[in-house]
Every structure is written in structure tokens, then in C-alpha cells.
Amino acid sequence: RFFGSSVPHNNSSVGNLRYLTVEQNLQDVVAVIRHVRKQMPSISHVVAYGGSYPAASASWIRRKYPDVVDAAIAQSPPLIAKVAFPEYDVSNLVALSSPDARCAQVVARTAEALDRLIDGGENQKGLMRRFKADFLIDAPMGDVDFMYGLGDSIAGAVQYGQKAGLCKAMVPLFKDAATLDDWAYANKFADYTLGAWGEAYFSQCFYRSTCMRDSVSGPTAESARSWYWIKCTQLGYLQSAPQEGLTARPRKLSVDRLLEQCRFIFGDSVEYITEAKVKAFNDEYGGGSNLGTSHIFETDYSDDPWKMASTAAAVQRMSWPLDQFDQPFVLLTCDGCGHCGAGVPKETLQLVYEQFVAALASWGIASPSSLEGVQEKIMASPRF
């Protein structure tokens, strides 16, 4: 609901978005399943399968409606709601430390340099011009949009299995790291960002809060605006910079500024995310540590920052909180292993698919011989 072509009445206004919640999303899917099974009574089993937010939905629907959905396969599911999500940024730095620690060091120094240049004055204006984002200089929320985009230039490389290109561009600064001035880091990073993501990178609606506010129909409304809404109102995942230790995005990008951005986009009449709402949601849906039922197969990837909102205790090697045998868990570990398998060699992904098929068979569920076509569709869908 509210993603892709399934936007009711092609209307993503605040009044209509009030019907975008996890609960209503799951109820929609349940209604569809029941309708299809009524039309096709020969269907023996229903398996929910997805990547990213749809993966979390697959886990949640199996938990809440085990009589309707027989199993779930969830790739990179963000299962744990949280208001601030600085772990996302820390995970990116850790990923950038392998196989070359110099990359993480240079990226962290770059983030510090950018933070100093974002001073609300002439340095900030010059920096925006350097990144071809001069239209953000006087824009409402322009500094937040700019900092968000700077962070995402790094995060996108890690999340989608492209960190090697980022490191290749930035590591040469290491030999002079202690003596370079802030503009040396900024200029090198601008060259990387505009080369990797295109000179119109900051023109995307995702990094222009005014555009996000005003886009109530069309492609932006069908993906990014819906994701902003569910983050701002129910799930959180506000990708704020860590306020201690090293960071890969400007430290001025705080959770308070991101909540301010939510209010700018959706107005003052909305009930926004709070710690109390997050606790209630996690209590209801398991918080990643108790999926609540059997036959859920969860997969995470070592470089993917979203794993930090997944079954975190297992990811961090702290404990194995899931049901021992009926909730299989894979943390595929390799350099470049990103969100939903982005960057993973095809032959390695095939081994993961074979595990899915084997798990379904062990649960008495006949499955297709290959899930590769389904995976390609997941990789082509919007992921944030």
C-alpha cells in the first residue's frame, strides 16, 4: 500500500497517508491472499518473500497472521523500529575499514572537514556550489537536505556493494591526511560524488524537502514520500550522525534536525515518531529478537547498514535470540556484500537461494527450483 502503483486514488496527501501504516499494509496483503485463495482453492501454501521493508513486512505478516501465511523469507529486513539510527552510519564506517583501514580513516576525516565547512556562512555556500547544490543555499531545510545527501553518497556506496569505488577515490588522501585542509577533503569528495552519482545528484527530490513536501502524486509520491512518511510516523530509522566517535556524515545532522525535516514535509497536524511509539511497536512485532512464530528465514549481509535494525544480537555475535531450528538466520560475510545481496557474486547468491528452497522443503512446502527471477525483481525495486 502506497508504494509503486498501489497508491489509493493516486493521492499521497497527508490526509490519505494517514492510512499508510504497517498494520494496514499487512491487512491489505491478507485480504489479497484470501481473495486469491478463494478464486484458486488449489493453492496449497502461501510464502511471503521480500527484501528491505517488504522483507520486514514478510516477517511481520507471518508473525501476525500465521493462519494465512505459511512461511516467510526475509532479505535484509529492518525489524527493529528506532527513532534515531546512528548505528547505520557506524556500520558504514566499519564496512569501509575492510579490506583497507585507510578508507575508513579518510572518510571519517572527510566527514569532519565537511562538518566544519557547514558553518551557515560563506564556507557552506561555497561547499553547496562545489557539489552543484547551490539551489539549496536559500532553501527551507537546505542545510539538512545537503547533509543528508552528503551522508548518502557514502552510505549508498556501502549499502549497494560499491564501496570499492569510493575507497579508490578517497584512499590516496591518506598519505597527507594530517596536513590537508578541509577544502582538500571536500574537493576530492565532491569529485567522487558527482562522478559516481551524477552531477544532478542533489537535484533529486529525495534531497529537496520542498519537493518532497509538494509531491503528492507521481513517482516521488509512490516511493520516497511514502518511505519518509512511515519513517517519520511509525518506524523511525532517522539516519542521524553519531554524536560520539567517528562518523561518516556531518555531525550536525542530528535526530532533532531530521524530526524538524519531518514536520516541514508533513505539517504540524501529524503525530510523529516518539520513543514511546517505537517501544509499543517493537513490543507488538518482536523487536527482531522474537519473531513470534516458526518458518521465518532471515538473511542479512555483512556490509549492509540495515542489518543494525535486524536481528541485532545475532549480527553482533552477542547471542542467538531466534528459535533454534524454525527461524533460520544467515549473515553472509564478504567485502561488498550489501543490502538484499547487492554486490554479492551471483554464484554465492545462488547458494543462498538454494538454502531458501531447502528450508521450505523441510517445512513441507513445495517451492520453485529457483528464486532467481524473484530476486531480480527485488533488486530492481526501491530500497532506502
Image (cartoon, grey):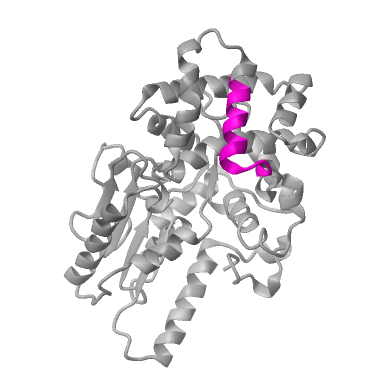
Q: Nearer the viewer, residue 371 or 223?
A: 371
Q: Is residue 199 magenta?
A: yes
For image coordinates 54% across by 7% down, the residue present is: 179
As drawn, the residue found furthest toward the right would be 138
Q: Is residue 3 above or below residue 236?
A: below
- Image coords of residue 139 (percent x, y): 80, 38
Q: Which residue shows up at 44% across the image and 37% down it?
A: 163
Residue 383 seen anywhere in this rendered image of the structure:
yes
Kindly indicate the quadrant of the structure image that contains residue 367.
bottom left
Q: Position of residue 85 (x, y in %)?
A: 50, 38
Q: Look at the magenta stretch and give its main secondary structure.
A: helix
Residue 289 visible from this viewpoint? no
Tell me: 200 left or right of 54.
right
Q: Position of residue 257 (x, y in %)?
A: 66, 35
Quarter of the image where the N terminus is located: bottom right
Return the residue nearer the eye: 145 or 280: 145
Q: Is residue 80 above or below residue 294?
A: above
For the point 34% across and 49% down, the residue is 344
Residue 23 image point, x, y percent: 51, 65
Q: Which residues are magenta?
A: 185-201
